[in-house]
């Protein structure tokens, strides 16, 4: 008998928020929840938010990229958008970029991470959701937790990871067909590092165990500005990571987040700011930021989800949040100068490039 494979889909969208790009209203979240829970397509679900984005965690047997599941998520976001409009929320329906939904939320605005797998007898996984940043924000944490024994002690202690991992990296600037490359660690480590250092161009999309071929990671890697052709907000990526056994342990996946690395995002998507690990359902504050990431741990059995454990809700992370706040203030002191702001191609809103265009004409060559 063919074993039924479980699929975990994590789909997120910003469909409007209270008081600016801060957090969705409870009414909107309730409406989305009610819509999802009324469906018999899925086995289980958890609905939450990180900053102004609502995350739908869906477990089901319909497989990856399934049109019915994607339509369910789309329709739930549409239903929530109606409430957001009624309440006059800011940016209502912001991430729903198409009028005619074609069966896959990828390329239509919402971010999606999905993994389809045969459940292990004890299937533990984590989900991550970031706000005010883009998919490259996960590059450094993933690199460190899958290739560096300083964070992943299992690479030297556990034989189950001794063959390393296969990384699938995507060129997020490329329009049209996905442009991807596969690299194997440890032998391609330096090549991987060369790509992943460029957070705005290359993002880790998938990671597979080379011991078993099983998938651990999927990151939502769509870039909203490639879809819309203009600035419509940062991508605020979500990620699923299957953990333990042949994969890194939960604590090894969390370990690099203690760096609070500088990433792209923050106010108007153009500066650089530290990625602050926050509790589930946190809102946005200082300078429309700082960029934040939340994480939850769960188990799944026959498609049924346990409750979510809030992985950054622990005293340890309070000091990291303080460190991130200090890093945020430190870089903000430099405002828009040099390293505090992204390169020309990445500046959102177009104001600076417009101004530069006008100045170009005024430049003269001195005799
Ligand atoms: C960044 C973000 C916010 C807005 C800012 C201005 O991803 O969402 O920082 O860019 O609040 O918003 P608008 O242009 O909607 O007035
Ligand atoms: Mg928003
Ligand atoms: Mg957002």
Image (spheres, helix red, strand yellow):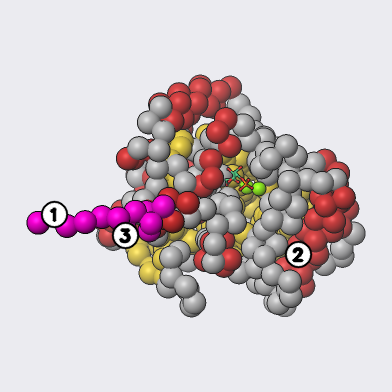
Q: Which residues are magenta?
A: 355-367
Q: Position of residue 215 (x, y in %)?
A: 52, 62
Q: Quadrant of residue 262?
A: top left
Which tag, 1 or 2, sits closer to the chain's start? 2
Instruction: Name the residue that disc number 1 marks.
Output: 366
Element type where label 1 sits in the image: loop
State the residue lying farthest toward the front.
367
Instruction: Name the residue that disc number 3 marks.
Output: 361
Q: Quadrant of residue 149?
A: top left
Q: Position of residue 241 (x, y in %)?
A: 56, 52
State the mark number for residue 74.
Answer: 2
Within the magenta stretch, is there residue 148? no
Mark 3 C-beta closer than 8 Å to ligand 1:
no
Q: Nearer the viewer, residue 86 or 180?
A: 86
Q: Position of residue 353 (x, y in %)?
A: 41, 55
Q: Position of residue 56 (x, y in %)?
A: 73, 54
Q: Residues within 10 Å of mark 2 (few under 14, many from 20)?
A: many
Residue 160: tell me if it is visible. Answer: no
Element type where label 2 sits in the image: helix
Mark closer to the observer (1, 2):
1
């Amino acid at each position: 008998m063919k074993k039924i494979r479980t699929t975990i889909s994590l789909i997120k969208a910003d469909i409007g928020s209270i008081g600016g790009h801060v957090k969705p209203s409870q009414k909107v979240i309730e409406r989305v929840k009610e819509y999802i829970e009324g469906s018999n397509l899925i086995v289980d679900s958890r609905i939450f938010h990180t900053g102004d984005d609502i995350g739908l965690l869906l477990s089901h047997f319909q497989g990856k990229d399934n049109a019915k599941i994607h339509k369910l998520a789309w329709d739930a976001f549409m239903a929530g958008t109606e409430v957001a409009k009624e309440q006059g929320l800011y940016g209502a329906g912001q991430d729903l970029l198409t009028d005619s939904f074609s069966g896959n939320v990828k390329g239509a605005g919402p971010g999606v991470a999905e993994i389809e797998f045969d459940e292990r007898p004890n299937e533990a996984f984590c989900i991550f959701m970031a706000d005010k940043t883009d998919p490259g924000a996960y590059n450094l944490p993933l690199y460190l937790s899958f290739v560096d024994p300083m964070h992943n002690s299992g690479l030297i202690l556990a034989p189950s990871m001794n063959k390393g991992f296969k990384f699938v990296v995507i060129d997020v600037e490329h329009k049209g067909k996905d442009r991807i490359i596969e690299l194997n660690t440890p032998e391609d480590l330096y090549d991987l590092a060369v790509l992943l250092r460029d957070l705005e161009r290359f993002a880790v999309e998938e990671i597979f165990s080379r011991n078993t071929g099983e998938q651990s990671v999927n990151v939502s890697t769509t870039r909203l500005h490639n879809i819309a052709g203009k600035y419509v907000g940062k991508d605020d990526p979500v990620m699923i990571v299957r953990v333990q056994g042949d994969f890194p342990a939960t604590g090894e996946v969390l370990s690099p987040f203690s760096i609070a690395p500088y990433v792209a995002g923050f106010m108007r998507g153009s500066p650089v700011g530290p990625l602050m690990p926050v509790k589930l359902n946190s809102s946005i504050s200082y300078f429309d930021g700082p960029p934040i990431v939340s994480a939850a741990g769960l188990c799944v059995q026959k498609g049924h989800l346990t409750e979510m454990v809030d992985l950054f809700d622990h005293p340890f992370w309070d000091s990291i949040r303080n460190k991130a706040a200090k890093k945020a203030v430190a870089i903000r002191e430099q405002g828009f100068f040099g390293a505090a702001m992204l390169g020309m191609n990445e500046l959102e809103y177009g104001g600076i490039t417009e101004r530069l265009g006008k100045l170009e004409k005024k430049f003269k060559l001195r005799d």
